[in-house]
Amino acid sequence: MTDNKNNRSKRKYAWMDEYIKRTGEVAMEQAKKNNTYIVYEKAGKIIPLNEEEEG
């Protein structure tokens, strides 16, 4: 990783950033298609994520 906070970090597997981003996008598309929502854990609590909360 670099010391310059203005640049993106340079990790050994930087290509995974785009892969992970796309995986999240596909999950949101599937949730919308199936009339459900994405759920994640934050600070030990379950948090639902829907389109209204994204922006």
Image (spheres, rainbow, N blue to C red):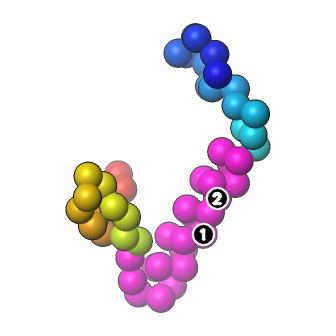
Instruction: Work out which residue is located at the far front of the displayed protein and give it.
Output: 44
- Secondary structure at badge 1 equals helix
Q: How many numbered marks, from 0 up?
A: 2
Quarter of the picture containing the N terminus is top right
Specify the quadrant of the image occupied by residue 35.
bottom left
Report if residue 49 is visible in the image: no
Residue at image coords 26%, 52%: 43
Identify the disc placed on residue 26.
1
Image height check: is 7 above or below 18?
A: above
* Numbered range of the magenta stretch: 16-37
Magenta region's main secondary structure? helix
For the residue pair 20 and 41, the one nearer the viewer reads as 41
Whether label 1 touches label 2, CB < 8 Å: yes
Image height check: is 21 above or below 41?
A: above
Residue at image coords 36%, 56%: 54
Specify the quadrant of the image occupied by residue 37.
bottom left
Image height check: is 53 above or below 10?
A: below
Residue 51, percent across and down? 37, 66
In the displayed structure image, the side of residue 2 where residue 46 appears, left or right: left
Q: Residues within 10 Å of mark 2 (few under 14, many from 20)?
A: few
Instruction: Work out which residue is located at the far bottom of the displayed protein and give it.
Output: 34
Residue 21, percent across and down? 60, 53
In the displayed structure image, the side of residue 10 where residue 44 appears, left or right: left
As shown in the figure, which amino acid type bears the numbered disc 2? Arg
List the residue tagged with mark 2.
22
- Secondary structure at badge 2 equals helix
As shown in the figure, which amino acid type bears the numbered disc 1? Val
Residue at image coords 35%, 52%: 55
Tell me if residue 47 is in the magenta stretch: no
Residue 53, percent across and down? 29, 59
In the displayed structure image, the side of residue 52 where residue 3 appears, left or right: right
